[in-house]
Image (tube, rainbow, N blue to C red):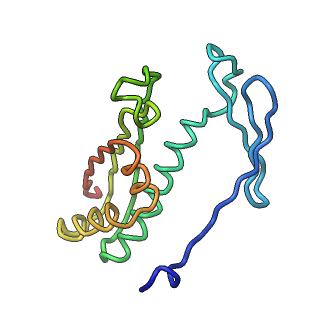
Amino acid sequence: MNDSAQKTITRTAHTEWKGDLRAEIRVRDCAPFYSDEPKGRGGLFEHPTPAEYTIGALTGCSAAHVEMFAKEASLPLEGCRVEGRLTMGHFPEEDERSRNGGVVEISLDIEVTSPGTEAQFEKVKALFREQCVLYRFARAAAPVKDVWTLVRPN
């Protein structure tokens, strides 16, 4: 398939500054949501920070892709939990850790509950690592550690 035949999707957000390091964010016709910063940085800390939205978006995308790839791998899915962590800091420009904007590591613990086979589970992991767009985006920007656990239903 040539590049001109590739399908693309553009997602759009509109943001308005609300003072005290807060922003109102609008997406499609959904209810607005807000970002904020900790009090020590000048915010009110009443809403998630942009970094929390970032890791939240990645974990939400991860759960959705586990479901999609479980179907593709014929893995019966009874549950999926994803815990994500984004570790970052402010480093001097000459510090190697500043090269990714200070993002040191992104970690995902992905727990899949299924009576399926180990081979089906491995196929889900492989499809996820190859095709999950936000995972690949994150991995291109910073080190990403993903730990997978297959839990058998009771």
Q: Nearer the viewer, residue 108 or 152?
A: 108
Question: In the rendered view, does 68 fall on the left or right side of 56?
Answer: left
The image shows residue 66 at horizontal and vertical percentages of 39, 63
In this view, 133 is above or below 74: above
- Where on the picture, by quarter, is residue 36? top right
Is the N terminus in the top left, top right, bottom left or bottom right quadrant?
Answer: bottom left
What residue do we see at 31% from left, 68% from top? 127
Q: Nearer the viewer, residue 81 or 44?
A: 44
Question: In the rendered view, does 140 fall on the left or right side of 22?
Answer: left
Q: Residue furthest front?
A: 94
In this view, 137 is above or below 144: below
The image shows residue 89 at horizontal and vertical percentages of 45, 24
Is the C terminus in the top left, top right, bottom left or bottom right quadrant?
Answer: bottom left
What residue do we see at 52% from left, 82% from top? 4
Question: In the rendered view, does 147 fall on the left or right side of 2?
Answer: left
What residue do we see at 30% from left, 66% from top? 124
What residue do we see at 36% from left, 23% from top? 95
Q: Total marks drawn?
A: 0
In this view, 11 is above or below 89: below
The image shows residue 111 at horizontal and vertical percentages of 33, 51
The image shows residue 5 at horizontal and vertical percentages of 51, 84
- Where on the picture, by quarter, is residue 94? top left
In this view, 78 is above or below 56: below
Q: Residue furthest left?
A: 118
Q: Nearer the viewer, residue 44 or 142?
A: 142
